[in-house]
Structures are given as structure tokens and as C-alpha cells.
Image (cartoon, grey):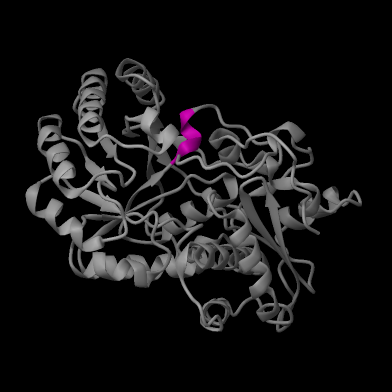
Amino acid sequence: MKVQQPKSGVLTPTNRRRFLQMAGAGFLGLAGNLAAAVETNQSASVRPAGSRLKITKVEPILTGSDVFLKIETDAGIVGYGDGTNQFLPYAVEGMLKDITPYLVGEDPERVEYLWQVCFRRRFQRGGPATGAAVSAIDMALWDIKGKAYGVPVYQLLGGLARTKVRVYGHVTGKTAGEAADQARQRVAKGITAIRFRAFHSYDAVDLHDHKLAVAQQIEYLAAIRQAVGDAVDLILECHGRYDPVWAIELARRAEPYHPFLIEDPLRPENPQAMAQVRAATRIPLATGERFHSKWEFRETIANGYVDYLRPDVCHCGGLTEIKKIAAMGEVHYQNLILHNNAGPLGTAATLHAALAIPNVDLIEAPWVNSDAKTDVVGPYPTVIKGYALPLEGPGLGFNLMSSWPDPALSGNPACNPA
């Protein structure tokens, strides 16, 4: 059942990440079956030996700008996926409906087969809607498989390549002083890497003044570096706003402050333009949050345009695809810093990928920016001294809880470039 879209209100980035709206009426049903759904999700539903599972129902759930997926099986094992792309919620929901006939009646343990079916049976392929839809399906299938065998998903992906994953937090002050104060707060919580950007006023109206934005970025960078010292890694976020000449100028002026990397300095439409920036600076570069498959990463990886790849498990085709992207990067000595602005479900999948993939250096952790709490889905991973620890439950390791979200948190799709 599709959730009725609210008539007014805006879903903020904070509310989106908290994932409070995930248990909308369509998600758990209007008949009061919440308790049963909680029990099904939390239990390690190991299937009988030798039996085969069958997908019986595929249900996309659109809540505000979030798109989630629920896949049910004949054994009562339920898997959940997050295919949220804040800018194209209706397109992703529609793509999931188009793909659903390829799934019902199939064995959910055939994850690779179903990934290929969902991607290749579409004559028109690729792009953000397909990437997000396949991501949600893939995530839900891995969740089912982990629950069927009673193990965390990372065990099915090859086991622990590491026992903890370093995270980075955000600062978003409207002035350099505010950003510096927030950075001190993150460091006080044990966070050892911080991402920031300036030019917030330009984001609000989709305008961009290169010269002023560079000046603001350097002003923020200098203030944050002074506030936290040299031991904390600073990620200079550009959100793909610059042309090459201004990205090069930004890198030149940033060098004295030793940023850990510059993220998305250029707009993503022309990957080869990154070669100009790569040749002009020693600062590491990163890109990839707006790439939606291994094919979109291919040119950037093969030509060594960046040092770090930034796939998002909710955008790039899910856990199955992110492992392939990582393997392509490993061959070219490129590591991953996983993009993640999701709530607990997408975050759980991100953490499982990072635990199992050898060339992951960091994951984005927006939940460390405040005391994030969830009334519907949890938990967020525990972070100790800047490192996230594994989620140990079966499947993706998140739980459904028994309280309904505040209706005021639902809203119309919002374009928030968080």
C-alpha cells in the first residue's frame, strides 16, 4: 500500500537522517500489525535445512523524499532496503514498481542473479533512479539472506576485513566562527576527521560565485584548522560547484592548511576535467557520490583522476555493486571513503560494506553530529574514539521499534544537498 503523500511541510535533512518517518502506514500496514513486524525483523529467522525461499511481495514505501523497500518471503523472513535519492523520490518509487514483476516468485538468495535481472531487463538502463531502485532491492535481499542464515551481512560478504571503521562528522556553521565551534564539539566527542563546506548562501538559491566561494572555503578551513589543531583530518567539501580553474585555485590556497582531501571539486558531468585538477595539486581528491554503477566509475578509476572513491550504497547499486567498484579501485590503488547521508537502515548497509571491503578508509557518519535518536528504526552504530563498531544482529542488524513517528516529520520531497 502506498503511503498518502502529505499536503504540506518539508522534510529536513536532520529528520531524513534520523529516519523517523520510515514506519509510515504503508510500511507496517494500517491493520495494527506493528508488533508482528517487529518480531519478524528482530528474530534470527533461520530457514529449515534444504528449503528454498520465495519472494511473495515487494512493497515500495514513499515517505516524504525517502524511498524504502520491504520484501516479504513465504518463510516469513522480511528484508528492508533504502533507495532514497532526495531529488528523485517519485522516479525511484516508479522504477521499483517497474522492477517488481522480475522479483515476485523468485528465490531471494540468488542475489547476483536478481541484480542482473533488475538491471539488464530494462532496455533503458543506468542513472540515479535505476541505481537507487536496484540499491534498495539488493540491500533487502542481503538482509533476507543474513536473517535466513542467522548471521550479519558482513559475514556473507567475506567476513570482517577490519573490526572497526573510522568515521567522519560534519560541521555546517553559517560563519567560519560557528563552523570552528562545531568542529571543537566533534573533536570533544572523539571524532578524528571532519568534513565542512562554506558558501551556504549560494546553495539556498542554486547560484555560485567561484571567487567568493573560494574565499569562504579558505576562511572556514583556516578557522577550523586553528580550532582543532593539526591532528584532525579536514575534508574540504565542494559539492561539485567549481570549474577547473577555480578548483585549482582553491587547492593552491588550501595547501598551507593541509586538508586531508578535497571532495567533489568539479561538477560531475565531465569526469576527464578532473585530470586538470589532479595535475595541479598534491592534495588528495575524491568523487563518486553521484555515480550510480560501476560503469559510471570506470573512467575515473581507470584514469586515476582521484585518490578516493565515494560510492553510496543507496545510490550505486547496493552492496553487490559497491564490492565490484571497490575491487576496480583496489587494482588502481584507490581507496574508498563511503558517502552516507542515510538513516539507520542505509547506515547499517554502509557499515557492513566498510567492514567487509579491504580498501575502505572512512565512512560518512552524520549521526555523530548530534545525539541522534530514532523512534522507529535503530540503532545507529556505536562510535568509540572515532571508530564505528559492527552491528551484530542477523541481516543488516537494525531493529524495528514499536512507536509511531510524529506525523509532523513527514513532508513533501525536499531538495536538501546535505
Image quadrant of residue 162? bottom left
Q: Residue at x 35, y 22 (%)?
A: 179
Image quadrant of residue 304? bottom left
Does the magenta stretch mainly form a helix, a strand or a loop? helix
Q: Which residues are magenta?
A: 365-369
Q: Which of these two is toward me, 185 or 247?
A: 247
Eyeballing the image, is 40 above or below 113?
A: above
Q: Which of these two is toward me, 205 or 142?
A: 205
Residue 11 % position (x, y): 62, 37
The image quadrant where one finds the N terminus is bottom right
Tell me if 74 is positioned left or right of 278 in this view: right
The image quadrant where one finds the C terminus is top left
Q: Residue at x 58, y 62 (%)?
A: 136
Residue 34 % position (x, y): 83, 49
Q: Which of these two is toward me, 138 or 217?
A: 217
Eyeballing the image, is 76 above or below 115?
A: above
